[in-house]
Image (cartoon, rainbow, N blue to C red):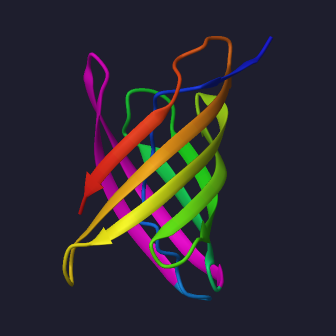
Amino acid sequence: MAIAALTVNAQVFHTAGTLKPKTFSVGIDPTLIVDGNTDFILYGNFGYGLKKGIDLNGRIGVLGPGDTYIGADVEFALGSKFSLTAGAHSYGDFGLDAAFLTTFDLGKSADLYVGVDADFVFTNTVTGLYGFHWALR
């Protein structure tokens, strides 16, 4: 029997800005996972601007401690500094994702982005309540 649970695994991969229509982005995110053990996973990601204020984002995580991570989301701009995302992923178990993001400009080449991320994971165990992530790039 599958149980849906919110997990503490936050995955905030991008700022609150959306891509312009018909533009494409590609990135690599090396990530440390610290949960009693320290593991490494390498994410490759892409984005594509669907229309003004809406983009599609996808990612694959390899070299990690277990299954390959595969996920995608659609991002909706809420003005220039906020956005909402909704998507799905597979990392051993299937999950649905939602996030609220905001971005603060720190100059021409740096942003601080903050997100509240929630994952509904369909599994046989309940693993937590919510996720929260701060990142500086």
Q: Which residues are magenta?
A: 24-51
Q: Is residue 80 magenta?
A: no
Figure label count = 0
Q: Quadrant of the C terminus?
A: bottom left
Residue at image coords 57%, 46%: 70
Residue at image coords 64%, 86%: 52
> Residue reaching furthest right?
1
Task: State left or right for residue 131 relative to residue 30.
Answer: right
Task: State left or right for residue 96 relative to residue 30.
Answer: right
Q: Position of residue 36 (x, y in %)?
A: 27, 16
Q: Quadrant of the N terminus?
A: top right
Residue at image coords 21%, 84%: 108
Q: Position of residue 38 (x, y in %)?
A: 24, 26
Q: Position of residue 120 (x, y in %)?
A: 65, 32
Residue at image coords 20%, 73%: 106
Q: Is residue 54 above or below residue 40?
A: below
Magenta span: helix, strand or loop, mainly? Answer: strand
Query: Observer-nearest residue: 49 or 86?
Result: 86
Q: Is residue 117 above or below residue 21?
A: above
Task: State left or right for residue 26 relative to residue 134.
Answer: right
